[in-house]
Image (cartoon, rainbow, N blue to C red):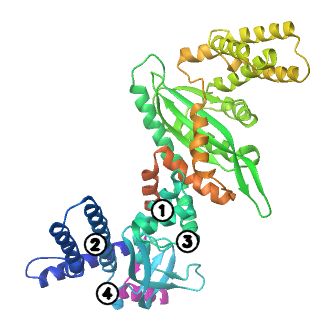
Amino acid sequence: MSYSMYLTLTLATLATSTASADPSGSQATGLEETLRPVREDIAALVARFCGGTVSPVATAQFEKDLQQLLREFGRVTSEWAYNHLEATGVDALPPQVECEGDSYRRLAKKTPQALDTLFGTIRLLRLGYRSAPSVGEPVLFPLCQELGVHHGTSPALCERVARYLAETAATQQGVLQRLRQEFGVAMGVKRLRALTAFVAAAMEQHRGPAQAEQVVRWLTQAQASSGRHRPVLACGRDGITLGMRYKSLSLYEVATAGTLTVYDRRGRRLGTVYLGYVPEPGQGTMTQQLTALLHEVLRRWQGPLPRLCYVTDAGDNETSYYHKQLRRLRHPLTGQQLHWQWVVDYYHVSERLTTLAETLFGKGRQAWAWMRKMQKLLLKPGGVGRVLHSAAALRSQRQVRGQRLQEFRRAYRYMQTRRQYLRYAEYRRLGLPIGSGVTEAACKTLYTQRLKLSGMRWQKEGAQRILQLRTLWMSGVWSEVFDRMLNVQHRNIKTRTPDQLRSFRAKKAA
């Protein structure tokens, strides 16, 4: 019999015995008595408010006081409920339990623990079971395992703490202050970090499947939409500098963000899932995570294949990912070669047009007018060739030299070597996005609004934990992933009654 089943039977026995002892039929006489002082305080507060002078100030104070009393009501209720899950007498509890193949023997008495909940801190009396010296976990508390308690925190408060840390502009001190104000929970930085590390690691295990399911839902919606284009699955990645702290110095290094976006038949963005990883040479982890997510989405998607496009700037890591990964990618089910259309971001190309204009005309109205004309021309069929021809002709006429000539050549070469990825008229005809604004915005929302606040410097482990939480929050899969985490974290603890122990020992002796 599992320990959770044992707790259920204990509660059923408690309810039956209470009902038979109470002539009125109430099954929670003990709870009613425990809650009576709080109920009386609430009634007194209402009486004082109704009997006094009503004003905005009095109303505001009434709501604040009532909120505190309701929180106390919840705290007392949860404390009573959690402490009545196990039988009061130690002798009534199983003498031995098993967890993950290890045996644990019952201790002589229960020990208290301060447990933080959404309603405040409660006192939990739970029975411990001691293991053999060879087992790594010296004492097991089955009740805490069944409740899902980690680092002295209930599951609901764990979720709230992690979500607060994932929100925009959050800080450690801000989260700790918020916990004190909203829940009356006093937590230190060390415990906050330990709790964050646990939740981030546990939720990360379920990120990929949850994000893939989210993308598949959007693809289903896109497939059912009306419009003249095929649905589009757009992949993107970009880098952003992040302040990193090491033992003796601080450095700015390039972190990376990845996105996977679905567009419907009208070209409307239905949603985006996000990835983020701290600075790493070669950005290999981002490459692995993004490719794995694409594989999982394509494996789960059963409908017609959407258009596949890769929208980025033409940086080294972005270019390498296209040539070494996407161009070689095959469908995980059929093995068919996938056709990815790389779209070099239109706005990054426009920056090169600005450079060409200023090297040809200098800064001013004439340069601006030529640049705007070339921007429009770039969106027409064969536009990139016409832009390059115009720039080359003007360079010959205006005899550009020196530093300006070097800048001209770099910008010109950037467009010339990537002209096969600058066919914006064709992309627009197919309903593909021509700008990497989604990924650029991901860098801002994922990093700048949380990890690049004033004076922030990060160690890689701490930054990655926040990124793991924040990507889940921004991808819209937070609740789903957290529920999966709780289901997996639950460990089945088996009990052994005295009769079972005697039978087991007899078989062993024989």
* Marks 2/4: CA–CA distance: 23 Å
Say if mark 4 contacts mark 1, CB within 8 Å: no
* Marks 1/2: CA–CA distance: 22 Å
Nearest to N terminus: mark 1 or mark 2: 2
Residue that label 2 marks: 73
Disc 4, SS: loop
- Visible residue check, residue 442: yes
* Marks 4/1: CA–CA distance: 32 Å
What is the number of the mark on residue 88?
4
Mark 3 crowdedness (10 Å alpha carbons): few <14, some 14-19, many ≥20: few
Q: Position of residue 185 (x, y in %)?
A: 44, 71
Q: Amino acid at mark 1?
A: Val
* Marks 2/3: CA–CA distance: 26 Å
Q: Is residue 424 above or below residue 109?
A: above
Disc 1, SS: helix
Quarter occupied by residue 459: bottom right
- In reply to whether residue 505 is colored magenta, the answer given is yes
**Residue visible at 50% across and 31% down in the picture:** 262
What is the number of the mark on residue 191?
3
Q: Residue furthest bottom?
A: 108
Q: Position of residue 334 (x, y in %)?
A: 56, 31
* Marks 3/4: CA–CA distance: 30 Å
Q: Which residues are magenta?
A: 490-510
In-front residue for pair 197/44: 44
Q: On the picture, is 406 further left or further right than 219? A: right
Nearest to N terminus: mark 2 or mark 3: 2
